[in-house]
Amino acid sequence: MFFRLDRPNGCGALLAHLFAFLAGYMSYLKKKFRSIKKLPTWLFWLPARLMQLLVRVAYRVRIEDPYDHLSSRGAIALTWHNRLFTFPTVCPAGARRRTVAIVSASRDGQYVVDLIHYLGLRSLRGSSSRRGASVLLEATAALKRGDNVAITPDGPRGPRYRIKTGPVALASATGAKIIPVSINASKYWAFRSWDGFQIPKPGAVVTLVLGEGIRVAPDLSREELERERQRVEAAMLAITRDEP
């Protein structure tokens, strides 16, 4: 497995079997439809429903939103790549309906797009390494429409917890506020991957934390943009909790 499961009995064993089923299901689909660029969207209905069920029965969810960001429109929400398992299900449905997520333009990114479709999130395709300029234009249009734009600022390949300049430049160009977001689990498994992808353990307290909004000035020089990037990164790290 990609992570170690401590004493897999009871609910932990059930959860491990669920993950194994989901991984096997996705592996089967990729092999079955290897020659097809896009899988039928309906195939992702079951994994999405299982993820929603898991959050309801296995975790205790708390929300810390002292600035009332969940009612925001036209904002840029940043969350770390290793928090993506719980991000689409822990966020309230109303906030998800007002949000478009930037997802990698790769084939694996298409799986994510089809999965989060059933979780109430729309998508834009692109990343810092592929379709970067195009997706920034599409994100600008989405913000002007009043949609929130969700970005994983350390994706798609890291380094972990290091923000790229793209989201900060987008905030500078559009005037949209940046909302730092973290999903912190009291206990979790971590994948052996570049981001240490996290899956909360059964019974974990999973807390959605939304930090203070950040405004970025327009027309920044390269040096000013880097200082703002560091400021946003520090704000993200301030609300990030990784349990030992």
Image (spheres, rainbow, N blue to C red):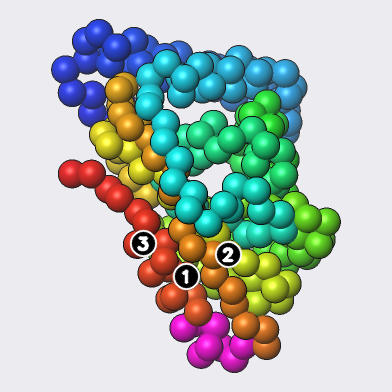
In this rendering, is residue 127 above or below 196? below
Amino acid at circle 3: Leu
Gap between marks 1 and 3 measured at Cα? 9 Å
Residue 217 image point, x, y percent: 62, 83
Range drawn in magenta: 220-227
Name the quadrant containing residue 187.
top left
Element assignment for label 1:
helix
- Quadrant (top left/top right/bottom left/bottom right) for the N terminus: top left
Relative image position of residue 193 (x, y in whole percent): 35, 44
Q: CA distance from mark 1 to mark 2?
A: 8 Å
Q: Name the element at disc 3.
A: helix
Between marks 2 and 3, how big is the CA–CA gap? 14 Å
Q: Residue at x 49, y 75 (%)?
A: 229
- Residue located beneath label 3 in the image: 237
Check disc 2 and give the amino acid type: Ile
Mark toward the start of the polypeptide (1 vs 3): 1
Q: Residue, x 31% and y 29% (percent of image)?
A: 204
Identify which amino acid the numbered label 1 is placed on.
Val
20 above or below 60?
Answer: above
Task: Count neighbours of disc 3 (C-alpha within 10 A) and say few if under 14, some if 14 to 19, many if 20 or more.
Answer: some
Whichever of callouts 2 and 3 sits on the residue coming sooner in the sequence is 2
Instruction: Residue under label 2, please give it.
Output: 178
Residue for badge 1: 232
